[in-house]
Image (cartoon, rainbow, N blue to C red):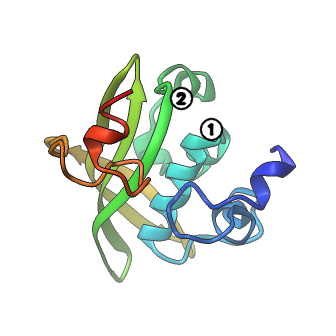
Amino acid sequence: MPTNTLNKPCPCGSGTEYVNCCGQLHQQQATAQTPEQLMRSRYSAFVLKQYQYLLDTHHADFCGALTVAQLAQAQPEQWLSLNVEAHSMSANVGQVRFCAWYRDGGTIDAIHEQSNFVLEDGRWFYTDGELLKVSLPGRNDPCVCGSGKKFKQCCLKR
């Protein structure tokens, strides 16, 4: 991991430096305490190409034959932002609904998912998720990248 990433804002959108946020989970200095924290760390792992972390936090019963190479091949050109819409947990299960925006081939799109998680032996794992319909923001809505500009003046324009 490049050291210049450590002191930058975490890709998960927490507003905290990566080294004090998802970086601790990626470096196995801590474990996720909630499904939302695990989901945010998994998004950051996608952004930073930490594919082994994605496999390590994917429940073995739901992972199939997924490999690091497959994860690396299926990546969009650029991740833009993460928007957590809802999250819940009770006992040993949790859910997180999110929208992960990306650019690929000049097109803006998102993974909009209701993800499921399970707690086993004190660790949260991603199990599976249901893909939901993606709606692009309107031209005058805030941009999905978090720039503070209108969508039409930012990512829609590129």
Residue drawn at point x = 40 percent, y = 44 percent: 62
Which one is nearer the viewer's eye here, 2 or 38? 2
Which numbered marker is on residue 105? Answer: none
Q: What count of labels does the image hold?
A: 2
Seen as rendered, the residue at the extreme bottom is 91
Q: Tell me, yes or no, whether the two marked residues, 2 and 1, touch with CB atoms within 8 Å.
A: yes
The amino acid sitting under disc 1 is Tyr
- Viewer-proximal residue, 45 or 63? 45
Q: Three-letter amino acid code at disc 2?
A: Leu
Left or right: residue 14 versus residue 109 is right
Location of residue 109 by image quarter:
top left
Whichever of callouts 2 and 1 sits on the residue coming sooner in the sequence is 1
Task: Quickly name the residue at label 1.
Answer: 51
- Compared with 90, 118 (above or below) is above
Say left or right for 103 vs 6.
left
Q: Real-space Cα distance between discs 2 and 1?
A: 7 Å
**Is 85 left or right of 154, judged from the image as shown?**
left
Q: Which residue is drawn at 29% across and 49% down?
A: 150
Residue 71's disc number: 2
* Residue 84 picture quarter: bottom left
Q: In this view, does 78 lie above or below 113?
A: above
Instruction: Give how far across and how far down residue 67 sits, in percent.
Output: 57, 28
